[in-house]
Image (cartoon, helix red, strand yellow):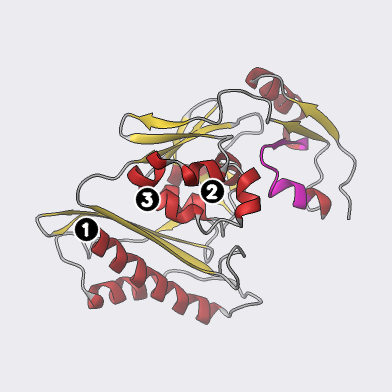
Amino acid sequence: MKPAPFSYVRAESLDHAVEVLREHGDEAKALAGGQSLVPALNMRLARPSVVVDLNRLTGLDAIGADNGSISVGALARQSSVLRADLVREQCPLLAEALGFVGHVVTRNRGTVGGSIAHADAAAELPLALVTLGGSVVTSRRVLAAEEFFVASFITALEPDELVLSTKWPVRHVGNGSAFEELAPRHGDFALAAAACNLRVESGVVAEARLAVNAVTQRPELVDTASLVGHTVDDEAARELGATAAAKVDPPPNLHGSPDYRRNLVATLVSRAVTRAWERSAA
């Protein structure tokens, strides 16, 4: 199929992009990497009257340290972020999650900001950002990741508001993280996904963040109070997996029933918690 007719605007500056978005409101769509928007246009799932191309904007593709976080510009290509030594060394959960995103070809064009703004309920980067307690910097404000994602394909962004960057907290001594996902094939949409980030002090969990995605409308944090102050063994990991599974209500899927996907959540959560614990010791 071919997209419905639309007007194309190449933004010359951030102000210009915001001005066009403000003028056309919900009828306008911003184009970054295009790995989600272009297929939606071709299948006529999206029918904007105006497409605003952001790719000529300068300064929005930087990757750098920023006061205890890694700042990733909205136009940074996913492949560039995955290759960055700073990311692989200081934010391994982001690097691990990126390895599950699409394929090499799509990561070469896809942007981190585009994935965050698209807010697909099965996307890896929103899950990783929520798990780490990161934030989204927009053209107006800074939003905690938990506030930014509202539902599948819905965010707190206003029609004339753009994602400028994301902030990813760096790991410290005693941190361990892990990302788990199952899809029909590598690069396909996940049937379920889980991510965990632990901070261990004096041999016990001092802080834990755990979230699931693909079985919910947005990345959902799981209560980890049972881990704090304790070590993690197989039983503790299984119990937390069972708790997470009991709180999700995934819709039917061509590749798995709701019960199957709940069982999958239990397994992935258990694995993520166990691997995060092991990595915290390393």
| Residue 29 on the magenta span | yes
Query: Is residue 66 toward the left or the right of residue 83 in the image?
Result: left
| Residue 105 on the magenta span | no
> Do we see residue 197 in this rendering?
no
Disc 2 or disc 3, which is closer to the eye? 3
Whole-angstrom CA distance, mark 2 to mark 1, is 36 Å
Q: Secondary structure at mark 1?
A: loop
Quarter of the image that includes the C terminus: bottom left
Quarter of the image that includes the N terminus: bottom right
- Mark 2 and mark 3 lie on one chain; the one further toward the N terminus is 3
Q: Which mark is residue 257?
A: none
Q: Which residues are magenta?
A: 27-40
Mark 2 vs 3: CB contact within 8 A: no
- Mark 3 and mark 1 lie on one chain; the one further toward the N terminus is 3
Q: Which mark is residue 282?
A: 1
Q: Secondary structure at mark 2?
A: strand
Query: Is residue 211 toward the left or the right of residue 151 in the image?
Result: left
Q: Which residue bears the numbered disc 3?
A: 92
The kind of residue tagged 2 is Val
Q: Position of residue 20 (x, y in %)?
A: 74, 24
Q: Position of residue 88 (x, y in %)?
A: 39, 47
Q: Secondary structure at mark 3?
A: helix
